[in-house]
Amino acid sequence: MRKIEHIGIAVKDIERSNDLFTSLFGKEHYKIEDVESEGVKTSFFKCGPNKIELLQATNKDSPIAKFIEKKGEGIHHIAFAVDNIEKEIKRLTKEGFQMIHKVPKKGADNKLIAFLHPKSTNGVLVELCQEIER
């Protein structure tokens, strides 16, 4: 794992949250994107070298809808950039971590993604991200 790629924050209303984070950071988001496979709408902000991803559920069965129902709005996950997501999944599985995704899938912001189950990471949902080469 090279660095923290972004921190994901679950929100009920992405437009209201965009206004809030625009005021907080003093600049607008740089991208809004729907990820149908995850049932979310995302909005990305840059804050120095770091990124914040806001996530709003687009259907009641999405992981974000379930998260907000259970825990309310707040930090949902921490994403780490990796060079080779398939190798990292194999390495972490061998180390005993439980993967939610054993095969990477397309996520937001031009990334391949895979999540580790929080049961194996002290309650923290961890996302692996690899830039998709264009």
Image: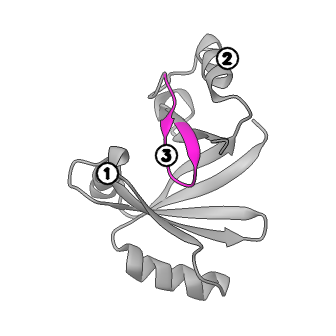
2 vs 3, front mark = 3
The x, y position of residue 71, in whole percent, is 36, 55
The mark nearer the N terminus, 3 or 1, is: 1
Label 2, label 3: how many angstroms apart (C-alpha)? 21 Å
Which mark is on residue 91?
Answer: 2
SS class, disc 2? helix
Which amino acid type is marked by label 1?
Answer: Gly
Q: Quadrant of the N terminus?
A: top right
Is 108 magenta? The answer is yes
Q: Is residue 35 above or below residue 120?
A: below
Q: Position of residue 56 (x, y in %)?
A: 37, 63
- Say what secondary structure mark 1 lies in: loop
- Residue 115 position in % (x across, y down): 51, 35
The colour scheme used here is one colour
Please tell me whether mark 1 or mark 2 is closer to you in this view: 1
Q: Residue at x 59, y 73 (%)?
A: 30
Which residue is at 60% across, 22% downward?
89
**Disc on the earlier residue, 1 or 2:** 1
Q: Which mark is residue 107?
A: 3
Residue receiving disc 1: 39
- Say if the magenta span includes residue 101: no
Question: Crowding near pointer 2: few (<14 within 10 Å), some, many (20+)?
Answer: few
Q: Say above or below: 72 vs 21.
A: above
Span highlighted in magenta in the image: 103-113
Quote the CA–CA distance across marks 1 and 2: 28 Å
